Amino acid sequence: MEVGWRLAADQWGHGYATEGARAALDYAFGKLDFPEIVSFTSTINVRSWRVMERLGMRRDPNGDFEHPDVPEGHPLRPHVLYRIRREDWT
Ligand SMILES: CC(C)(COP(=O)(O)OP(=O)(O)OC[C@H]1O[C@@H](n2cnc3c(N)ncnc32)[C@H](O)[C@@H]1OP(=O)(O)O)[C@@H](O)C(=O)NCCC(=O)NCCS
């Protein structure tokens, strides 16, 4: 199960993505009882990495992958994978 976010550019820099993701993770772990949530983003998308890290998610370097829907050689193709387990969610 993946958590993700996308905001209009004029709404960046206010904490809304992290706030929304926290609510989604509370629901996923508290109500739905999922054991683990992942998130992934293009390696160059540093703002998205920062949301994952603010949430306490940890990068899994073994999970790095080339996104199959992005053409080979495209700068958005390489992706990083982050994970968080229910017992690590506070
Ligand atoms: C990824 C994306 C959602 C991140 O947005 P963001 O605004 O950087 O993230 P947040 O909403 O969590 O905001 C955090 C920023 O708000 C700032 N902020 C300001 N007021 C704040 C407040 N009251 N509370 C919390 N943070 C606040 C934080 O300091 C932080 O800024 P910084 O990164 O410069 O340190 C956004 O860049 C985006 O939509 N990108 C395009 C789509 C995309 O790439 N999605 C991911 C695909 S996998």
Image: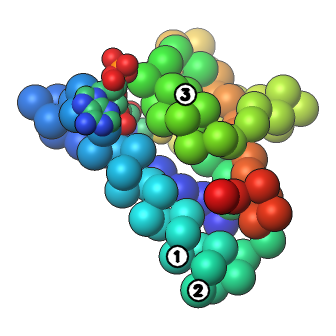
Using a 10 Å C-alpha cutoff, classify the residue at mark 3 as few (fewer than 14 neighbours), some (14 to 19) or many (20 or more): many
The amino acid type found where label 2 is placed reads Lys
Q: Is residue 33 above or below residue 48?
A: below
Taking the spot 10% from the left edge, 30% from the top edge, the residue there is: 10
Disc 2 versus disc 3: nearer the observer: 2
The amino acid type found where label 1 is placed reads Tyr
- Image quadrant assignment for residue 72: top right
Using a 10 Å C-alpha cutoff, classify the residue at mark 1 as few (fewer than 14 neighbours), some (14 to 19) or many (20 or more): few
Q: Name the residue under label 2.
A: 31
Q: Name the residue under label 3.
A: 49
Q: In this view, does 31 lie to the left or right of 12?
A: right
State the SS at label 1: helix
Q: Name the residue under label 1.
A: 27
Question: How far across and how far down the image is residue 56, in percent?
Answer: 65, 41
N-terminal of the pair, mark 1 or mark 3, is 1
Question: How far across and how far down the image is residue 64, in percent?
Answer: 77, 30
